[in-house]
Amino acid sequence: MSVMNSRRLQTGSTLIEILVAVTIIALVLTAVSAMIFMSIKLADSNEKQQLALQKAEEALEFFRKERAIWSWTAFSTPLVDLSTYCMSSLPESVASISAQLGECGDEDVLEAARYSFKRQATVTFESANRLNVEIEMLWTDGTKAKNLVLDQQFENY
């Protein structure tokens, strides 16, 4: 009889061991899946940040190019002090930038990859021979509003 009782106890212990093992495996899988989810979310956020940086640099490069090919007067005259220009697309030249005067609205979206951004340039004249261009990129990351700002000074040389 004692042999039979011993086998019954072993069977019960094995069932408990299996339940404990399944519980541990479930906890480990939950933790791993949470890490994978966070990694994907972080990679997506980093991709948006990188694209925003590229598009901001693209806009600054537009202003650098325009400053390089035009005289100071031709470059600075079309720009309005303390004004914001919506740059969902790059203008043909600085002379035509006045068509984009004003902040970006909800419909003024710059599409890059599969993401939507708003790109705005703010021009500030520091003196008659120096101005500052600030490029601001705006986007949403989940429910959070994000932004990135680059700026450059231009001078009359």
Image: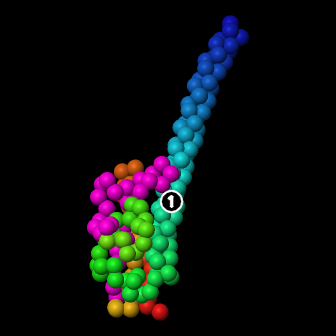
Residue picked out by circle 1: 51
As drawn, 87 above or below 26: below
Q: Position of residue 114 (x, y in %)?
A: 48, 48
As drawn, 21 above or below 102: above
Q: Position of residue 1 (x, y in %)?
A: 68, 7
Compared across the picture, whether 128 is left or right of 93 comes to: left
Give the residue type that dot 1 points to. Leu
Compared across the picture, whether 44 is left or right of 72 comes to: right
Determine if the magenta segment contains residue 117: yes
Residue at x 58%, y 25% (from the top left corner): 19
Res 21 quadrant in image: top right
Task: Tell me where the magenta segment starts and ends, as one range.
Answer: 99-126
As drawn, 66 above or below 4: below
Residue at x 43%, y 68% (from the top left corner): 92
Determine if the magenta segment contains residue 105: yes
Residue 50 versus residue 26: which sits nearer the camera? 50
Q: How is the image coloured?
A: rainbow
- Mark 1 is surrounded, within 10 Å at the Cα level, by few (under 14), some (14 to 19) or many (20 or more) other residues, namely some
